[in-house]
Image: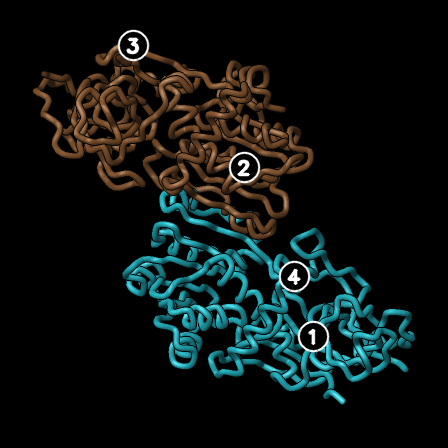
Chain colours: A cyan, B brown
């Protein structure tokens, strides 16, 4: 059996292109003891992968030139040498961009076939949803009546953060980068207020949207939006520091107003985190999110591209800002 | 009975002077139900009081012009209309700069006569010691073998932080502003390393002093020292944000490298706090500190000035940077 695989051809300078990726075709090995042979069903494409294409360590190690690109994927077991994962099981895990591959069963998580669309295990019920769940509920801990601000609110993480905060009785204010996204947040997701950071005066709009100050801030963005939120913090505010996308393309260390005096004056807690910090509690998070989804209390949007050969284009599309919700690629149907 | 009292004469511009203070003499009232008449024994002078001389709210409200200046003080009950605080009891509380005054018993804390020098209830066993105790042990939670950095390490708070961290088995590195203070930290208090931020290359010296990175940072200072520490943070570092003295005299909002990318990459926790946040746990802190003191495991230095009329000079002396340890004024002996 042969399989196509996508390698990192070279480290891109600035914006990646189709040439950043190289397709190869190769024979697939037989699974050894404790391993399974997987058929890929859905592949996740995410902005953080751009960082992994650079040299140098961040919170995840870099991709290697000439080696497969990898990331979150949903796959089905087609041959098994592990009792826990019999043939037919659908799993989610960190996998190569390959049609078929052998992987150790350890590190794969079996998921139910019927609880939700399988692609949701890369979105609402996967890393983005779990990131929202733990950052909001473990770090921010919003209480009924409090004000929660989310930056990057229309993204796969931010849209879940806002809905979870509403479920917990908070007033929710989001920032996003287009009029369509602002309308989506208010009309579809039930945000109390949404601000277009590209066209509004962010500081003034935030102050108006948060007349009682800010108790919780879930930060996906950093920069000027974050500076404006810091000026509105209430005593004992909590900040989940999840992303800093405003600085990901910066070539020099970004400079801004020092936040410490504001954090000190308000006894604020600020916590950086990645979803991997909560690895042991993932099953709890998936269970809770699945339940809210089945109760009709959470909405989730996806942009689904079809076909293994479309993975690079789907990835490149992340940077045009025109996707809505989570971007995934459908590679095959389950058997 | 008459008593001298020190009022705020006017709001100082920049450095306060002797003219910032006004002495008056007035009759002392009789204590009403639930009140006590107090004779002041020791008065605390602290840098944070400079901020209270300005208009505008910080984490404590401003002093009022023409009204008594107040702060931490140790006093003795000389008349009582409260059962819990009989005549002779020594108390600590937030009191006016007066020789005698009437105060509600509520808000005063009785202290033992013989457990420690009474002035220590303004230092090691008072606000500075409790600030060190809760910030280090509740926020930083240092483990044996970890590296703890303390800025402002020779101050009343920092010197206790460093000793407590050593007691918990951590490697302790302090920053201070003179060769004498650096020698004091290493030779008297047992710090593993100490850095003179005025003469050393702080970033290089810190990197050398912390070969295994920084797990905990207790920040009294902010600014360039803090920037350098951020570059050395280990995964899951903890930062207790206690003071930002480097910016207290700034006339514009200070600007610096944005810390968020560094805090995110390391999943760092940063928490602003004031000792009042831990009000309910003060008795626990005082008990623990008293025990360590009595076991000979904590050292504490004081600069004691004698005489009620010397309070303004003792306060002004804080800004010359020549005091060692906690500055207090002795007003009277207990009876």
Subunit bearing disc 4: A
Element at label 1: helix
Element at label 4: helix
Which residue lies under the disc numbered 1? A312
Same chain letter for marks 2 and 3 = yes
Q: Is residue A179 above or below residue B276?
A: below
Which residue lies under the disc numbered 2? B217
Which residue lies under the disc numbered 4? A280
Q: Which mark is residue B306?
A: 3
Marks 4 and 1, how far apart at CA? 32 Å
The image shows a total of numbered marks equal to: 4
Marks 3 and 1, how far apart at CA? 77 Å
> Which residue is located at x 64 percent, y 76 percent?
A121
In the rendered image, residue B102, in percent from the top left (x then y), is placed at: 16, 27
Marks 2 and 1, how far apart at CA? 43 Å
Marks 2 and 3, how far apart at CA? 36 Å
> Which residue is located at x 81 percent, y 64 percent?
A67
Subunit bearing disc 1: A
In the rendered image, residue B171, in percent from the top left (x then y), is placed at: 63, 30
Q: Nearer the viewer, mark 4 or mark 1?
A: 4
Q: Nearer the viewer, mark 2 or mark 3?
A: 3
Element at label 2: strand
Element at label 3: strand
Q: Is the N terminus of chain B in the top left, top right, bottom left or bottom right quadrant?
A: top left
Apparent side of residue B28 relative to residue B52 in the rendered image (left or right): left
Around disc 2, counting alpha carbons within 10 Å, would you say few (fewer than 14), some (14 to 19), or many (20 or more)? many
Around disc 3, counting alpha carbons within 10 Å, would you say few (fewer than 14), some (14 to 19), or many (20 or more)? some
């Amino acid at each position: 059996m042969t399989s196509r695989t996508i390698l990192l051809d070279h480290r891109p300078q600035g914006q990646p292109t189709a040439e950043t990726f190289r397709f190869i075709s190769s024979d697939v090995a037989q699974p050894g003891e404790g391993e399974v042979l997987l058929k890929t069903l859905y592949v996740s494409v995410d902005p953080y992968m751009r960082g992994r294409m650079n040299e140098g360590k961040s919170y995840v190690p870099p991709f290697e030139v000439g080696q497969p690109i990898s990331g979150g994927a949903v796959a089905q077991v087609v041959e098994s040498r592990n009792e826990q994962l019999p043939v037919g099981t659908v799993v989610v895990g960190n996998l190569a961009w390959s049609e078929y591959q052998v992987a150790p069963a350890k590190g794969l998580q079996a998921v139910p076939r019927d609880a939700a669309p399988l692609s949701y295990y890369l979105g609402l019920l996967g890393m983005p949803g779990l990131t929202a769940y733990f950052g909001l509920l473990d770090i921010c801990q919003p209480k009924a009546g409090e004000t929660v601000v989310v930056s990057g609110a229309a993204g796969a993480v931010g849209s879940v953060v806002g809905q979870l905060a509403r479920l917990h009785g908070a007033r929710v204010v989001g920032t996003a980068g287009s009029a369509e996204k602002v309308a989506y947040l208010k009309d579809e997701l039930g945000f109390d207020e949404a601000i277009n950071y590209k066209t509004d005066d962010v500081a003034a709009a935030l102050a108006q949207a948060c007349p009682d100050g800010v108790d919780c801030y879930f930060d996906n963005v950093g920069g000027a939006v974050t500076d404006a939120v810091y000026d509105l913090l209430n005593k004992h505010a909590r900040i989940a520091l999840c992303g800093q996308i405003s600085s990901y393309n910066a070539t020099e260390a970004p400079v801004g107003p020092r936040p410490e005096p504001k954090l000190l004056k308000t006894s604020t807690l600020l916590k950086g985190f990645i979803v991997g910090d909560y690895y042991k509690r993932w099953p709890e998070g998936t269970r809770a999110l699945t339940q809210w989804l089945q109760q009709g209390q959470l909405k989730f949007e996806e942009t689904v591209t079809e076909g293994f050969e479309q993975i690079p284009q789907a990835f490149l599309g992340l940077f045009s800002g025109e996707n809505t919700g989570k971007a995934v690629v459908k590679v095959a149907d389950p058997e």
